[in-house]
Amino acid sequence: MFGLKSDWSLDTNDRYFTLDDYAGAEPRWCTGCGDLGILATIHRVCREAQILPEKIVSVSGIGCSSRLPHYMHTYGFHGLHGRALPVACGVKSRRPDLDVWVATGDGDCFSIGAAHWVHALRYNMDMTILVFDNGIYGLTKKQTSPTTPEEYQTNTHPGGAILPPLNPLTVSLGVTNVSFVAQMVDWNPPLLYETIKAAHDHKGTSFVRIIQRCPVYMEQMNLDMMDDPANLLLLKHENGILVPEGVDRLFENQIEHDPMNLANAMAVAADESKMPVGLLYRNPDALCYDELSNAGLDMIDEEKLAGVNDALDSFTI
Amino acid sequence: MNDIAVQQVFSDDDELQARDSAESIREHIVEIVSDSGEGAQKCGQTFGIVGARMGNGVWTVEIIPAEIQPPARTPDGASGIRIRLGEELMTNMGNEANLVVAFNEQVLRARIASGAYNSKTIVLLDNMWASDESEDIRTEYSEALAEFTDYGLEVHELPIQEECLKIVPDPRKGKNMFVLGMLSHIYSRDADKALDEITKIFARKSEKIISTNHELFKAGYLFAKENIEHHFEIVGKAQTDKSMVVMSGNQAVGLGVMASGMEIVAMYPITPATSASHYLADDFHRVGGFVHQAEDEIAAIGFAIGASYAGKTACTITSGPGIALKTEMISLAAMAEIPLVIVNVQRGGPSTGLPTKVEQGDLLATLFGAPGDSPKVILAAATISDCFHFVALSRKLAESFRIPVILLTDANLATGVQPFERPDVTCDWFSAPVDQSSWDESVLAYDWDEETGLSARPIPGMRNGEYVLTGLAHNRNAKIAYDTTSNQEGCDMRSRKLAALGRTLNVPEIHGDPEGDLLVVGWGSTLGTIEEATDVARENGHKVSSLHLRFLSPMEPGLEEIFKRFKKVMTIEINYSDDPKAPLITDENRRYAQLAQVLRAHTLVDIDCWSVVSGHPLQPGNISRVIIDHVTEIEGGK
């Protein structure tokens, strides 16, 4: 469309982008917040892929995570609480040339936006969804989120969270037509980079749950995992996330997991004794809704006019 | 029936003879009522289209039960259609029906109860129930018939089922075309045109189905010729030499979307709006468009906003409860200045209310239903032609003013069918291709013009135009701004756009004299009824005029000046207001109808109102009585 090839990078070798070219305003996240590392990683992935900044649209909802678009020097859409995904789908619906990223959080995605989460996975439009999951509402100051651990004390449940936490992985894997489900932790930059890169490279909706530290309201949840990597389970496979040399030494628990195997992915996701990190599931052949919504994009005005007149003809008496 | 008989009936000579013996009348209101699923609506729509093709004025309105399969033979299950057919342009459903075809007696009872008929109404009733094997049904039938006689209806019991059984084994499918044949003879319709329309209806079906329906039509036509004494002629005088189209308001909305150049309609099913999207689902591909059925109302508008933000102004079509859900998103579009077209096909409220019935209950919700000040453009379609043209207008306004535009229609327009002049669409109607030139870096994302509030909009893909749209308070540079001046400036600028648009509008035209005793103000689908009722009052010597508003935000200019030329101004609306005579109601606490509230605040004129929430479209007979009552009070006070 608009005379641009989808592989536009071939035509733009006169521009080279550094990390600074993707950096927007100075982040206002708290010191020690895991979001800072995620942001830096996104900048790196963009730089490595040399994406045109003007072709990036980062869409978010409301919450700490959703401030991300302001920290990108790209187009951004900081919309309503829970509603990033429908907007992102709309952006992509008639603009296949745009590179759509979604930054959302556990409250934004798994609670108020849960309906959109399920359906966006099913639409499988080409975009990268990063869920910054710190297990707590941060911006509104420590309320229970769907992934808050049971018995964890919050301002809405001072006696401790009363329900077992939602498992976003099993839910995501249970959605028909889901095509990419990964999980990562924010404190392993090389693996986080490879995960976000793989998500971005995937054609279809890539869903990445990033376990993210909130040093202010949810220190404990992640300290356990950080202090004792035995709580994590590294998923390895030749078709999975690339594990940089040496990084695998950090993980005492590792398994080979074929990301094409949905049943095994579901089993890994359901085993909550350890937190899996890596690619749980990928289906490169899932139907992409944007290919349907883009139909007719190249139609010129004269053809449209003929179409309108044909339609009017059928009502003409 | 053999072919020779058919040939004879439809030969030119016979038709000419038939015309000669017909009684010439100016207009008639015809109803066809049945159980749900018996095809009465298809029959009536086709009857209306044939009328339009013969140059008659036509207004059709559907009679819809709220359930898909209500119990058979019950008053609640009454389903059907009303067709007002006249020599001249018809703008509303009229008063009591002149002739009704009923498939059973129980649905007829429902229509009598709602005041659809009077003692002169001719009833053609299927007599199959008189000999039903169930004694209960036979008793119900004879009791109802006695009721009808008491009411004064002229009832003709006809063997419609029996005649259809000669052609099809199950007349539930097919009786409607037999009835169409009957009506075509009674009203001297052009049988070839009717047969032509039947072919169109079943175009996707087999030849066999088409020929069976033709046969049913012809049988009905012959049956009426031989057995029904009533025979009328309504000459079509509404036809001009211009090409005409005939469609429902919802189809007009769908076609308006196509003619506007919009490429995305995002929707969630909701009565009575959905049929607009049904139409688009069939035809949108002709202009390269796509209907997105979203997971919910909020996602539907979110999707449309995403497409609009990315440069392809989109549309979402819904009804009242959907508007309630979309409120936060509409406010975002106002705040972040995203062009967007929202069509609200209003239905009865509050809450789930009356899904299939008409109300003008969403004016205040669309004007004010949002946190803070969320200025938006609000238009109300008054005719089916408006439903088409206003969608195209809405897209242009949305883009020019970088603002959400809400187009209000209602259930009456949605299902009503009326012919109008075929629009002459040109490529200028379409939105321009998405601008992907470089953005001038020195121009901010909200470079508000002090005088008009207008600003140009960077579109994703434009080099150097990168900005982050936010629903938070922001400054001209699109940066989040919590300081003491930015939110004031943003609100000023967004509101100023309405003032700028308002300056481009004309003073509305008055129907009737420019001054007098009473001015009736209306909006939306009530135009035809109010003007017809006003004419009746004027013919009776009263100094009444009427005014109809199409722009409700910004309001059309010059209203205060106009209002001051009348002794009294009142609105007539289909929404709730307190009856001034009701218990506890005083001048102080009386709650006014919605437009009346707005106009009172807007002009400081003491505007009265009359409104009703029965779910039915307004009828000129009732409204002329309301008008005459009010104007007589003023005359008495002279």
Image: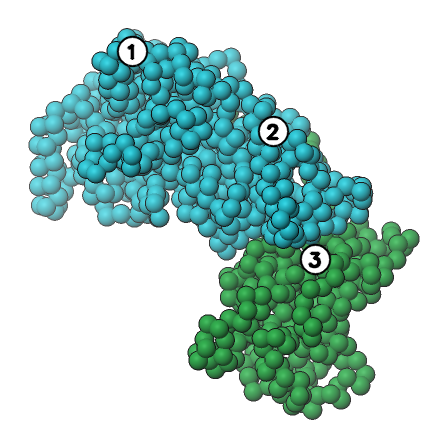
Give above or below for B4 relative to B431: above
Which label number is shown at residue B18? Answer: none
Q: Which residue in the structure is indicated by mark 1?
A: B542
What residue is drawn where x is 38% and y is 33%? B597
Q: Which residue in the structure is indicated by mark 2?
A: B500
Q: Amino acid at mark 3?
A: His
- Residues marked 2 and 1 touching at CB (< 8 Å): no
The image quarter containing residue B62 is top left
What residue is drawn where x is 76% and y is 56%? A73
Q: Amino acid at mark 2?
A: Ala
Chain A color in figure: green
**Can you see residue A14?**
yes
Q: Kindly report which numbered mark, 2 or 1, lies closer to the viewer in this rendering.
A: 2
Quarter of the image with the C terminus of chain B in it: top left
Q: Position of residue A201 (x, y in %)?
A: 74, 65
Nearer to us in this view, B416 or A261: B416
Chain B color in figure: cyan
Q: Position of residue B292 (x, y in %)?
A: 55, 49
Give above or below for B604 relative to B350: above
Q: Which residue in the structure is indicated by mark 3?
A: A70
Mark 2 vs mark 1, CA separation in Å:
38 Å
Nearer to us in this view, B229 or B372: B372
Q: How many marks?
A: 3
Give above or below for B550 relative to A122: above
Mark 3 vs mark 1, CA separation in Å:
65 Å
Q: Earlier in the sequence, mark 2 or mark 1?
A: 2
Q: Chain of mark 1?
A: B
Q: Position of residue B86 (x, y in %)?
A: 35, 17
- Residues marked 3 and 1 touching at CB (< 8 Å): no
What residue is drawn where x is 32% and y is 26%? B608
* Crowd band around label 2 with a 10 angstrom C-alpha radius: few (<14), some (14–19), many (20+): some
Q: Chain of mark 3?
A: A
